[in-house]
Image (cartoon, coloured by chain):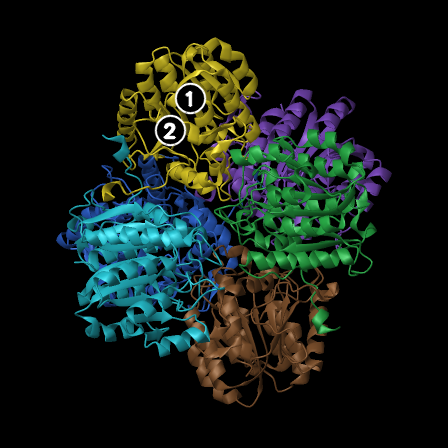
Chain colours: A yellow, B purple, C green, D brown, E blue, F cyan
Amino acid sequence: MRFDEAYSGNVFIGSSHDFTTSRVVLYGMPMDWTASFRPGSRLGPARIREASLVHEEYSHYLRRDLSEIQYFDAGDIPLAFGNPQRSLEQISVFVQQLLSYEKIPFGIGGEHLVTWPIVKEIYTKYPDLVVLHFDAHADLREDYEGEVYSHATPMRKIAERIGGENLYQFGIRSMTREEATYAEEAGIHFYPFAVIEPLKQIIPTIKDRPVYVSIDIDVLDPAFAPGTGTPDSGGITSQEMFTVIHTLAAAELQIVGADLVEVAPAYDPTEQTVVLAGKMIREMLLGLFV
Amino acid sequence: MRFDEAYSGNVFIGSSHDFTTSRVVLYGMPMDWTASFRPGSRLGPARIREASLVHEEYSHYLRRDLSEIQYFDAGDIPLAFGNPQRSLEQISVFVQQLLSYEKIPFGIGGEHLVTWPIVKEIYTKYPDLVVLHFDAHADLREDYEGEVYSHATPMRKIAERIGGENLYQFGIRSMTREEATYAEEAGIHFYPFAVIEPLKQIIPTIKDRPVYVSIDIDVLDPAFAPGTGTPDSGGITSQEMFTVIHTLAAAELQIVGADLVEVAPAYDPTEQTVVLAGKMIREMLLGLFV
Amino acid sequence: MRFDEAYSGNVFIGSSHDFTTSRVVLYGMPMDWTASFRPGSRLGPARIREASLVHEEYSHYLRRDLSEIQYFDAGDIPLAFGNPQRSLEQISVFVQQLLSYEKIPFGIGGEHLVTWPIVKEIYTKYPDLVVLHFDAHADLREDYEGEVYSHATPMRKIAERIGGENLYQFGIRSMTREEATYAEEAGIHFYPFAVIEPLKQIIPTIKDRPVYVSIDIDVLDPAFAPGTGTPDSGGITSQEMFTVIHTLAAAELQIVGADLVEVAPAYDPTEQTVVLAGKMIREMLLGLFV
Amino acid sequence: MRFDEAYSGNVFIGSSHDFTTSRVVLYGMPMDWTASFRPGSRLGPARIREASLVHEEYSHYLRRDLSEIQYFDAGDIPLAFGNPQRSLEQISVFVQQLLSYEKIPFGIGGEHLVTWPIVKEIYTKYPDLVVLHFDAHADLREDYEGEVYSHATPMRKIAERIGGENLYQFGIRSMTREEATYAEEAGIHFYPFAVIEPLKQIIPTIKDRPVYVSIDIDVLDPAFAPGTGTPDSGGITSQEMFTVIHTLAAAELQIVGADLVEVAPAYDPTEQTVVLAGKMIREMLLGLFV
Amino acid sequence: MRFDEAYSGNVFIGSSHDFTTSRVVLYGMPMDWTASFRPGSRLGPARIREASLVHEEYSHYLRRDLSEIQYFDAGDIPLAFGNPQRSLEQISVFVQQLLSYEKIPFGIGGEHLVTWPIVKEIYTKYPDLVVLHFDAHADLREDYEGEVYSHATPMRKIAERIGGENLYQFGIRSMTREEATYAEEAGIHFYPFAVIEPLKQIIPTIKDRPVYVSIDIDVLDPAFAPGTGTPDSGGITSQEMFTVIHTLAAAELQIVGADLVEVAPAYDPTEQTVVLAGKMIREMLLGLFV
Amino acid sequence: MRFDEAYSGNVFIGSSHDFTTSRVVLYGMPMDWTASFRPGSRLGPARIREASLVHEEYSHYLRRDLSEIQYFDAGDIPLAFGNPQRSLEQISVFVQQLLSYEKIPFGIGGEHLVTWPIVKEIYTKYPDLVVLHFDAHADLREDYEGEVYSHATPMRKIAERIGGENLYQFGIRSMTREEATYAEEAGIHFYPFAVIEPLKQIIPTIKDRPVYVSIDIDVLDPAFAPGTGTPDSGGITSQEMFTVIHTLAAAELQIVGADLVEVAPAYDPTEQTVVLAGKMIREMLLGLFV
């Protein structure tokens, strides 16, 4: 035993111990520095891992077991407490390295702003990238209270970088009029309220392209996922969320990265949100990257 | 700055500062004196206002923004702590004055008994009044433990005043046999369990009449609205509730008053109920009174 | 007043005071000794009774009132704290006696392992027994961490005793691959994910046989029933659960026993789970045994 | 086994099964109907019993074990929900019967108003009665919002019945000026803020008289007993409370009755208040009545 | 009734309705924008007012009643959400106006940074100002993560402005070595850990000078005041806090302003912190400004 | 960056990155398998680390900073979920290795049973070992419900191994009569209730011997440390606990190991227990091993 390697720590169920042979790398981004209403998503990754113990490693939906795939839980990226700018750079560096090892990054937030550096790096590798975004909020603001790097702006940054026509937004039910206008002008594939139907329709059109999947837990109704920073009523159910994942799985897309963000355990006294998030991650690990 | 006017306090998002030019007046009725099982709805109005910050002022459902309408949040009516009789009179006086200014009253409870003095006053102005009531409970008892003014009796008082045939009850799933019998005998339009279908059917029949809308948050399932005094499982979803509001909006009825009652923050640790209530109020402000 | 009988205690609404004339006997099994993830179901029966006060004794679904039937709430069986083996024997003895008095046992858990001694006793009386099992988990493990008597094994014990072909499992969405294989090999009627459709289909085939109904509250989604030990997202709604009960009621089966298990109040800060469980028990009392 | 006696229920640790041979009878009064600020003490007795499991039956303070004394936990008196007047009568009847059996009543509240009927009955038997009252509040109001029977009035009723000079109040730190004036005029032995010193001083003066002890849990600081209806900061510590009990024990007074009231579990998320109350009851059982 | 004045809102008990004749003005500063560990103090003022209902207006400690003094609760200052710089300016303007009306400002936080603009304004009026600071933290950092305006810096700003020798710090138990060094070098009267003894000693030396009192609720131990953003164990008790206030009251100092800050209701599930804060405010109102 | 070393994870503040040069090694033992009343201490180590962020690395009590010492946080030992026997062996192996590297083990529980394998290993190295035990409970049972390895037995095992005369127990206030008798017969230095005075008295007698310090968080009153499995009222304050640590620090004993156990975050909604535990660990790191 080497003590500097002794830390088994808190890993997601079924994680391999071998980074080298793993294709997908799971990692946490414990950052909530720009949250305005209810911070706390920085503890999301840790709590989701702890609660993952409640799940079996086998999914009867997909008839597959985590022991059959190889994925590595790298733990949380150490981020500069309270400093968004530096944290984003740290995420960039981390993802660059993952990509240089030919790994598929699967990130757990943390606030949604973390998606920006990830997509930026992946886009460099895959200029033909498509981003599928599931969320209650459009996240298309130019700035929030004067701040360009905010939990309210990542999809704007992404749309500007990869082109609005390569961004697909599902389930959006909260936005300003300016964001709605921008979505239209930028040519974003914008599907307010609905999720499953538009997803099924657009899948054939992205079949041959690299795809990044970003899920904000608040696309679900607060009844199913209360533990989040900016809850918005009127969302989808957990069964619908699993239908989304299984639809993506059945489509056999080329998924080159994914994230699940905005789980805030402080507002999750029953642990139902972290339990749900853990099951989503298991289904994504088993379904999206095979 | 005049200090006796300094209190900006805790107002619902998008409230105008001008009472005179506002058509709709939002006000709280912080009263839970007759609650038997779980009191606490007296804090509903304050908490809904606080949490309204999580919402945008723009609704993409209705493609309208609170800045486009004029409504005034008058705060909470000061009510006599622990004294139902006097509190009801204070509500009566308040609503009378609103009506004398030609304002549309939009009240936030507090317990459901508050609806009785409001409807009584509005009925004086609009003798042709129709009341649409959305609730898990019939609230048709003659008395509760000998008390005529109780959270279990307001709809009985209203039916007796305006005539049972002018009362429409939707989603009711908890009642005594006596209440069910009374509903039938009094000619109430009584729709147990169902909400949206019967609502769509009756709308054409009330098109030309003044309408009052009273929503008890417990018409929703406790999964969506746990923060309430007498939860009853088996209710509607938040999406169905928005369909109700948008159905009313699309019908362009002459709505002369509304309320949302029975939000009890003490049983809402995730804040999902006050978040939902805030969004319902935004949609009602934007949809019902235009 | 005899003081050794003075304890009215905490009884479910509408309980008769007369054991002799009651057909159904409700009883609690305050046991959670083998729970691994989140214990606490030992307090389920007490909290469900306390919260039953929120419900009317009348059901408009079934148009029947608890005053019209005769059932007796016998309170909680005194179980040996921390000792599974002895607790199971105590349940066995209790159920034997109930059966000797020709009573129908209706048990409230406690963890799911309590179902094993109940079914064992009932099977002795009704060798043609059919068991209907509603749950998120298959509970078909041979052992759990080497322990044969565990919350993860009761349905395996039951299948081995009554024959897999007499066991029907609905709504199962969490299991190991071994359990899935066993279900198939043992000839269990195994309906993963779905509940209502398969139930309707199999009802005609069990019409003339004695039926035991075992419901694990976690067959519902955690949105509706967060207060449970091993929550699993993706379950049914409360309306679907009432449809299950009312479907059973309408089928007029010969139901010889029932249980509702795994309500864990510690994870139920809003009380929505105990409120739901109380309503389920009322509907079952009014619907299943008439 | 007789099923109408089957209910072992939820009893305080170490309770005898034999009413006849028990000298002290413990009983709950689940009533909080007149609480204004934070109701919930009706669940105090049940929760204190449940949590009593955490304690040993042996006290090293007193070097005595509950197995050495005979006391009987009679459970909760069934009280008329929401009806103070009838509930008080039910308590009166219960206590009368206890006294007719020569038992010492030891009651658990519930709100403090329950002390009134108990003392009234005991005073009939012991006209020389002394009442020791430990509380943050004087409870000496003539009425509360016009109501004579309120949680704010029991000590006024008692002072008027037994004579102010037979009432000793310790630790009082919240009162109106009117109550302070009344305490003085009525000749009450009134010790604001202080507890242990005045108690030690007055003990010799009551040595030969029958004594009733009434403890409101809020005499402790909310740091030690947050779970109560009207918390008031600045109270005594748990160690000081045990010194009070052990001082009474050492004095070998003739204690003819006692109560512990106002434990409200809804405000006790850590269970520290019910744990403390349970230990106080054990120490009182072992120390006061020997 | 004028509706733009209708808002009685949520005021602290015993507030006068007349700004003009009031000497002391109570006001909230709902700001927590720079909190790093646990935000939420922006809701402190509102929750303290709501819970003030639990207290009598009479204090037996001081034998004085709020009806005997004149103070005015001006509600919360409307502050720019998420913008520290502008919020501080808004507080400055508000306090300037209060001072121009010859009112004594008594502020409720909000985070401790709010003390900076208040003291800055008061110092302009009273150049001989003494500041008494009660806190677990020194708040003497030059900056926090590069930010000069932070909850960790206000006392540094104040020391630099009014001179370290005019600042008295009591109860400090958390600081960096740099802060300890600065306290010494700047000539601050620095009393780590201890509170009452040093306070008594220095009072004679400040008798003839204008005094500002700033209390951070975390000077109390988390046992007494858990609801705060950066709790630190080892603090004083509630009785000691009242001794502080009553010592100040007995000294009859010329107190020209005061604040109570850092109450964060989200970490106060039992409400003991807001209850304590309310009682502190009552005692301060009754004792400090007479 | 090597990804198999990327996990910075969740470490206690001020941890060195260098195992080799560190003298003290901090490690968690996430085990609560034998808890009977309220499990959950398995999450203690993780939550204490997370909350350690609230503390400065500098202690003004000791005028020392964590940057001045070298200690290494090795994370949690991976233990066999639900299996006490194997977990104890895993702890033994871990501690053996630490000792072979000449490190001082500083463990965080987890339940108190973890102390048994640690002391067993240290005793092998230091046969002259003295154990100082601070706890509310004697933990001297021979077995608990027939189980020799239980949270109620570790000090019995230790007394039998190292000799009762080498065991010092402070603050004990909960035990059976059998445990009290055993303590006496075994020659244990047994100090019920009191802590600081007896500690000061015995220190000179153990000056030249190797000392192990085991602190159960429940030696503190639940007011200060509610988050624990078997709370017992009447304990010491946080200031007294720091006095204990600083008394040990001043004595300059040869401390060869230490632990802090039984922190159960599920009963710590305000986080005051994990905050306290973190400060205790900082003071112990800075004070005990220098």
Residue E264 as seen in the image, left or right of residue D164: left
Q: How many marks?
A: 2
Residue beneath label 2, please? Answer: A71
Distance from Cα at disc 1 to Cα at disc 2: 10 Å
Q: Are marks 1 and 2 in contact (CB under 8 Å)?
A: yes
In the displayed structure image, the side of residue C17 where residue E133 appears, left or right = left
Q: Circle 2 — which element?
A: strand
Residue D275 vs E40, above or below: the answer is below
Q: Secondary structure at mark 1?
A: loop
- Foreground pick, B2 / F79: F79
Crowd around label 2: few <14 · some 14–19 · many ≥20 (10 Å): many
Q: Which mark is residue A289?
A: 1
| Farthest left residue in view | E185
Residue closest to the eye, E174 or C145: C145
Q: Quadrant of residue A61?
A: top right
Disc 2: host chain: A
Choose top left, top right, bottom left or bottom right for residue B139.
top right
